[in-house]
Amino acid sequence: MKKAFILPSKKETVTVIGLMILFLLLTAVCIGLRSEHILIAGLYLFLFFAGKTTRKLAVALLPFALFGISYDWMRVFPNYEANPIDVEGLYNLEKSLFGINDNGNILIPCEYFAIHNCQIADFFAGIFYLCWVPVPIAFGLWLYLKGDRSLYLRYSMVFLFVNLIGFAGYYIHPAAPPWYAINYGFEPILNTPGNVAGLGRFDALTGLSIFDSIYGRNANVFAAVPSLHAAYMVVALCYAIINKCNKFVITLFAIIMLGIWGTAVYSSHHYIIDVTLGICCALLGILIFEKGLMKTGWFKNFFNRYYTYIK
């Protein structure tokens, strides 16, 4: 016997549709509506109204949705309008800490790898960087679908929380990536377009334009500190260990994490300093969430209500 189709309550329906209309209107006015906004909104509404099972999934995906929205909405108030952009200071600090002597010239690691690279490294660098967001999100979905909803919720909330810490860092200390200093010098040029930098070698090697299309939509190039590329797999690995995943998964996550860290520097997208701060950002987010927020009454109550809805 088929289960009865259960519609959301009137309150849920009005809330979701109202928020979706508000989101689309504000997006259209503030940053301009794009085709992906319509697609994502349509998909979310479909999941919410298709049935009880998909509705729980739609609600469970909210932390990841808020991550995407918050990143996109940084276009409304660019971080370089909040504080001065650091270009030269970060470059010089990297050189003083990690400079490499190349035939008598002291180069930052990114400059060294821009000169000394190989196709095998270029290929694996591209593969690792393509794992940046998909692997952490896929891990979250796996936790959800296998029924570990409580851990999924902790993981997805920490993922969002780490991003918010990182975004705050962008505004506290706007900073240019290495490729900017290498290509443009130390004078900040506002509205500089995104750049594939060393990842362009992967596109050229494969005949694809994957990274060109990704970085062509970069919301803000002056957001190198901290490196959230370095942070995401730290979060995924920590929760894989908490979940007591098998050794293969943990080893795979560790390899991907290290590969992303190396690629960030190899491709001139981040300084070693950025990567280090990104790792610290992830660990700080996990620590504050697990040992701070989850111990407070109001947040624990919110978490339990959220968990009850999606379990």
Image: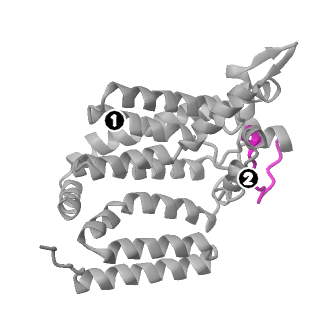
Amino acid type, mark 1: Ala
| Residue 18 visible in the displayed image | yes
Q: Alpha carbon of mark 1 to alpha carbon of mark 2: how far?
A: 33 Å
Q: Quadrant of residue 236?
A: top left
- The answer to which of 309 and 107 lies nearer the viewer is 309
Q: Position of residue 291 (x, y in %)?
A: 26, 40
Classify residue 46 as left or right of residue 265: left
Q: Position of residue 300 (x, y in %)?
A: 20, 54
Q: Quadrant of the N terminus?
A: bottom left
Q: Residue at x 17, y 54 (%)?
A: 297
Q: Residue at x 67, y 45 (%)?
A: 175
Q: Residue at x 24, y 80 (%)?
A: 8
- The answer to which of 292 and 40 lies nearer the viewer is 40
- Reply above or below: 10 against 144: below
Quick one: which residue is furthest to the left in this view? 1
Q: Position of residue 152 (x, y in %)?
A: 29, 49
Classify residue 143 as left or right of residue 220: left
Q: Earlier in the sequence, mark 1 or mark 2?
A: 2
For discs 1 and 2, the disc positioned in front in the rendered view: 1
Q: Which residue is mark 1?
A: 240
Q: Is residue 191 magenta?
A: yes
Q: Is residue 276 magenta?
A: no
Checking the image for residue 105, the label placed there is: none
Task: Please rate how many residues cluster around mark 2, counting C-alpha atoms within 10 Å: few if below 14, some from 14 to 19, many from 20.
Answer: some
Quick one: which residue is furthest to the front in this view? 1
Q: Which residue is mark 2?
A: 194
Is label 2 in a helix, a strand or a loop?
loop
Point out the stretch of residues depicted in magenta.
Answer: 185-200
| Residue 221 visible in the displayed image | no
- Reply above or below: 10 against 221: below
